[in-house]
Amino acid sequence: MEERAAKSDDGVALPLLVAPGLDAFRHGFTTRAGGVSRAPFDSLNLGGKWGDRPDDVYENYRRLLAVAGVRRMYRVSQVHGVRVVRVGRGDALDEMAATPADGLCTDEPGLGVAVHVADCTPILLACPRTGAVAALHAGWRGTAAGMAKAGVATMVTHFGCHPHELRAALGPCIGACCCEVGPEVVAAFVAADAQARDNGSVVSGPAKEHIDLRRVQALELIAMGLAPDHIDASRDCTRCDPRGRFFSFRGAGGKTGQAVGFVVAGNPG
């Protein structure tokens, strides 16, 4: 994963984390930098939660759209599940934004899809042959329930993608270093994978056990047929990043902004 300065035709510049494996697609994971929101949402808050000024969020999204080079970026009402919805230009933005789901997919060239995060993992999928893409939101509930698997299955079902040709990017999220959880959460991961403690998905901590969300997601993607070298995973932890680049729900005690992971469908290869 690399941090690059993305710039739009009208001069807007935003730092984005990008995955080299998805270079054929416009995509990225935003940081806190480049927006107009005031503390504690400073500055590129792209979420409407927790009290930021709507006008500031609107301007931040305008900047993101300019950098992404799209007029429309579809989102959903995230509910910590595994539902992935297909979107097209005929769908109304506001209706889709009110749809309970945690993932979006499309194969319409130039159409963007995005998910909001502030510790959860943003997962992007792309198929170079068909141009289809998906953006997935996976917190601990969605990860334990198999969101990565649901995303791959959706790409196969809707667009005829083959898992081995898919590219995946796992963006910044709370790392295993900071993702301390209670026994009920550990039980959910062990129930989903009896080898969770052996394969590094559940790790010991000084007080409680910790979950490595990206490890779980990567293992699931591989089990679904993705090549390991087609998975680009950030190593950044949103809670303890030494440069303070990311929004963190845990780190801020619940009042913070949100970043997005986005990807734009391309032309079939």
Image (cartoon, grey):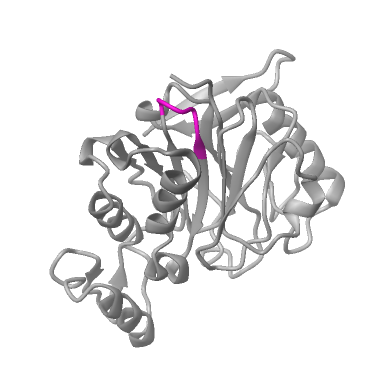
Q: Is residue 232 visible?
A: yes
Q: Residue at x 46, y 66 (%)?
A: 142
Q: Is residue 13 visible?
A: no
Q: Is residue 201 above or below residue 16?
A: below
Image quadrant containing the N terminus = top left
| Left or right: residue 244 compared with residue 185 | right
**Location of residue 189 in the rendering, given as x and y in whole percent from the top left corner:** 31, 75
* Most foreground residue, 65 or 10: 65
- Quadrant hosting residue 171: top left
**Location of residue 227 in the rendering, given as x and y in whole percent from the top left corner:** 23, 39
Q: Residue at x 48, y 22 (%)?
A: 268
Highlighted magenta segment, given as a residue range: 128-133
**Location of residue 224 in the rendering, given as x and y in whole percent from the top left corner:** 28, 52
* Most foreground residue, 120 or 253: 120
**Location of residue 120 in the rendering, given as x and y in whole percent from the top left corner:** 49, 59
| Left or right: residue 115 compared with residue 184 | right
Q: Dominant secondary structure of the magenta stretch?
A: loop
Q: How many marks?
A: 0
